Image (cartoon, grey):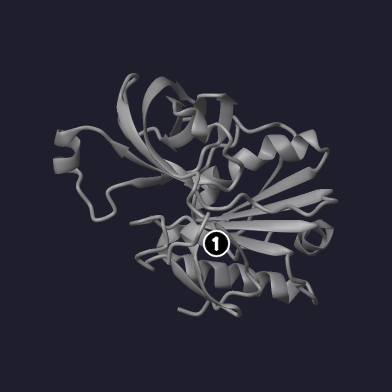
Amino acid sequence: MLQGGQFDNMKDTQAYIERIRRVSRDYQRLELAVDKSLSSMLAGQAVLARRIEKDYEIQHWNPYLRELWFPVEILNSNIIVVEVPAATSYQPGQLLSLLGPIGKPFKFRRKLRNVLLIVYDTPPTSLLMMLPALLANDASVTMVLMGTACQYDTGHLPEEIEILHAEEDLSWQDMVMTLGWADQVFVLVGPSKELSNFADVMRLVRERRNDVPANYIFGVFQRQLPCAVGACYVCMLRSNAGAKLQCVDGPAFDLTTLHLEN
């Protein structure tokens, strides 16, 4: 299902870890020296990363071969930053193979005043790159952490971001007001149960908002990608408009258009 022009900018390049910085007890940021073709990546786009170490590949082989990394920051024309668990061992100078950019940038409304980010059972890493641009355009941003996402230490995030922690029933204070206030909502859930978790969030939203319009609430998918070029269909989603692929059409999809039942 390769589409003309879709992958003209995708490259398989090498990178190396220039610097490692611990940002919290559980997470570290890797500054990667990359090919300049990746310096124009926008929020929503990702790379598939693989270590260039034979011993590592033998010990940690899995059918996906590469990890999906969403950059959290681009420092200059050849440095991108990714955030990974601190428990994973990396070393400065370590070589990586990067395939990217993958996916389409997030689409924001032209007049965007208030943005709501809902993060459920996963760290908010895939959403972080949008924050500087939103704040630079004077948008107000609220991030709601739900489930295991509440364990994420937000101390290194911009202080302008309002952070809320949901209760065990996934509700939060002033939930109706927050959903009505938001011009656009982005939802991120744990990849192991994406469809059912997105369905839970949509149920909560519909219970508290009479009308959920199109292009209002978007689910950001982050399941691992075997091919990233639309050939294997492992990342296929069912929508009102037919089959969609995370690697080609995503990672963000209007949740009102997706079939979320398993």
Q: Is residue 160 left or right of residue 29?
A: right
Task: Give the residue at x 50% y 33%.
Answer: 37
Q: How many marks?
A: 1
Q: Secondary structure at mark 1?
A: helix
Task: Give the residue at x 55% y 31%.
Answer: 39
Q: Is residue 175 left or right of residue 234?
A: right
Residue 4 makes an appearance in the image: yes
> Percent from the top left, x then y, of residue 106?
64, 51
Q: Amino acid at mark 1?
A: Asp
Q: Is residue 89 above or below residue 233?
A: above
Quadrant location of the N terminus in the rendered image: bottom left
> Percent from the top left, x then y, of residue 23?
51, 27
> Percent from the top left, x then y, of residue 151?
51, 45
Quadrant location of the C terminus in the rendered image: bottom left
Residues 75 and 38: in front is 38
Task: Give the residue at x 68% y 39%.
Answer: 131
The 10 Å Cα crowd at callout 1, few under 14, some 14 to 19, many 20 or more, is some
Residue 23 makes an appearance in the image: no
Which of the 4 image quarters holds residue 28? top left
> Percent from the top left, x then y, of residue 178?
79, 57
Disc 1 marks which residue?
A: 249
